[in-house]
Image (spheres, rainbow, N blue to C red):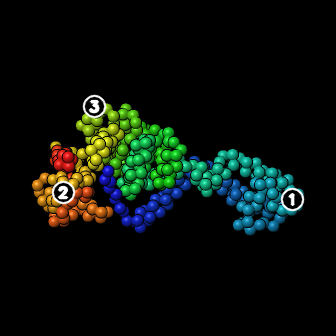
């Protein structure tokens, strides 16, 4: 079936992606700081405040005071059971200070200071939190809820068209998770019905929301929440029940409601008669369709020019192909022959008539 692709300036996208990564690192680090700020503050106070105190104790005992810049290093050595000098001092309070530092170090590490350092340099251990930080930097993006068989194909299409995408799914297969990571799509591993989850996905800054789970009830529940939180967002839903579909369009301002069977039906029907038929467009009460049609030898299309065929059949020939050569919006004087390929846009009833006449004239 015909497809569309939006081409965006790659230089701008690289620039935007770099800024987004910088913002994500800042926000993720801020989250780490909020989680581990007390052990980090305790470590800094111990290193610098304890270093100053150690220098004062040495001066009180009559020993030369080390430079202030070296005192935190002495504290670090004491924390790992390494004495700062080769010989133990005679003063018991200095020896007690030496033995106290490893105990303080164990307390600080137990509160999470070592975890902060490890997670700061290896964010893969906090992949969920990192992807949430990345999602929080998105603007004017698309959110897709449910990345199953249909949702994954939607994600591939949107990413291929150049759109920024955030995915929400509580239970992802490993293969799907890996593919989304390769596509650069951040994943929110939470329940999409939760307002906090929708906030994390950047719902208030998104341009569209796609409810693509296999549960009508879940899709309906989430759509109600989405419409409440962002009255202006465009919503597209996957829905099996026709009653739900009509109600969502009428009462919740859902832009489009489709089922997988509804989307696949034109492709199956077109394949049965040897054409490629897109989903019908409903505009101002009229149905329009676009088809890819092979011209049958001897049919009413064979021998006519593009202009003549368009005027006589109330249709628009948007593409003409012959012998591997393709012309978009062909000139009116181009003559059509049997075996050519045409892409035709017209009212749906006209399309059905054109297909039938093309086949009947052949017989």
Q: Residues within 10 Å of mark 2 (few under 14, many from 20)?
A: some
Mark 2 or 3, nearer chain start: 3
Task: Determine whether 53 is above or below 220 in the image.
Answer: below
- Which numbered disc, 1 or 3, marks the residue closer to the eye? 3
Left or right of residue 42, residue 327 in this image: left
Left or right of residue 82, residue 17 in this image: left
> Does dot 3 land on a helix, a strand or a loop?
helix
Identify the residue at image location x=81%, y=67%: 64
- Which numbered disc, 2 or 1, marks the residue closer to the eye? 2
Query: Which residue, given by chain and number where applicable, does mark 1 sit on?
Result: 89
Query: Which residue, given by chain and number where applicable, does mark 2 sit on?
Result: 302
Mark 1 and mark 3 in contact? Answer it, CB < 8 Å.
no
Identify the residue at image location x=26%, y=34%: 247
Left or right of residue 180, residue 220 in this image: left
Q: Residues within 10 Å of mark 3 (few under 14, many from 20)?
A: few
Relative image position of residue 244 (x, y in whole percent): 30, 33
Residue 289 has which mark? none
The one nearer the camera, 83 or 286, is 286
Mark 2 or 1, nearer chain start: 1
Q: CA distance from mark 1 to mark 3?
A: 86 Å
The one nearer the camera, 210 or 309, is 309
Q: Residues within 10 Å of mark 1 (few under 14, many from 20)?
A: few
Mark 2 and mark 3 in contact? Answer it, CB < 8 Å.
no
Query: Which residue, given by chain and number where applicable, does mark 3 sit on?
Result: 243
> Does dot 2 land on a helix, a strand or a loop?
loop
The one nearer the camera, 287 or 105, is 287
Relative image position of residue 342 (x, y in whole percent): 24, 56
Residue 223 seen? no
Q: CA distance from mark 2 to mark 1?
A: 107 Å
Relative image position of residue 314 (x, y in whole percent): 13, 53
């Amino acid at each position: 079936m015909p497809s569309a692709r939006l081409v965006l300036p790659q230089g701008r996208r690289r620039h935007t992606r770099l800024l987004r990564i910088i913002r994500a690192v800042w926000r993720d680090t801020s989250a780490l700081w909020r989680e581990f700020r007390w052990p980090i503050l305790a470590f800094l106070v111990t290193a610098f405040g304890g270093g100053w105190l150690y220098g004062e104790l040495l001066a009180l005992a009559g020993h030369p005071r080390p430079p202030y810049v070296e005192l935190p290093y002495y504290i670090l050595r004491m924390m790992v059971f390494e004495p700062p000098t080769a010989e133990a001092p005679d003063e018991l309070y200095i020896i007690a200070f030496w033995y106290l530092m490893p105990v303080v170090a164990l307390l600080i590490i137990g509160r999470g200071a070592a975890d902060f350092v490890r997670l700061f340099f290896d964010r893969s251990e906090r992949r969920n939190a990192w992807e949430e930080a990345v999602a929080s930097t998105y603007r004017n993006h698309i959110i897709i809820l449910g990345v199953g068989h249909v949702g994954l194909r939607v994600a591939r299409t949107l990413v291929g068209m150049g759109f920024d995408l955030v995915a929400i799914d509580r239970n992802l297969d490993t293969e799907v998770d890996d593919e989304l990571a390769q596509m650069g799509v951040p994943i929110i591993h939470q329940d999409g019905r939760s307002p906090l989850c929708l906030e994390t996905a950047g719902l208030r800054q998104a341009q569209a929301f796609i409810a693509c789970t296999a549960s009508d009830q879940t899709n309906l529940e989430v759509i109600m929440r989405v419409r409440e939180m962002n009255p202006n967002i465009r919503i597209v839903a996957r829905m099996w029940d026709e009653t739900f579909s009509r109600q969502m369009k009428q009462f919740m301002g859902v832009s489009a409601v489709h089922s997988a069977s509804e989307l696949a039906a034109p492709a199956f029907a077109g394949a049965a008669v040897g054409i490629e038929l897109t989903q019908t467009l409903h505009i101002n009460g009229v149905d329009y369709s676009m088809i890819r049609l092979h011209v049958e030898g001897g049919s009413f299309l064979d021998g006519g020019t593009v202009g003549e065929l368009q005027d006589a059949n109330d249709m628009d020939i948007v593409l003409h192909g012959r012998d591997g050569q393709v012309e978009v919006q062909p000139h009116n004087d181009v003559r059509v022959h049997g075996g050519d390929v045409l892409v035709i846009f017209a009212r749906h009833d006209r399309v059905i008539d054109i297909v039938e006449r093309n086949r009947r004239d052949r017989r």
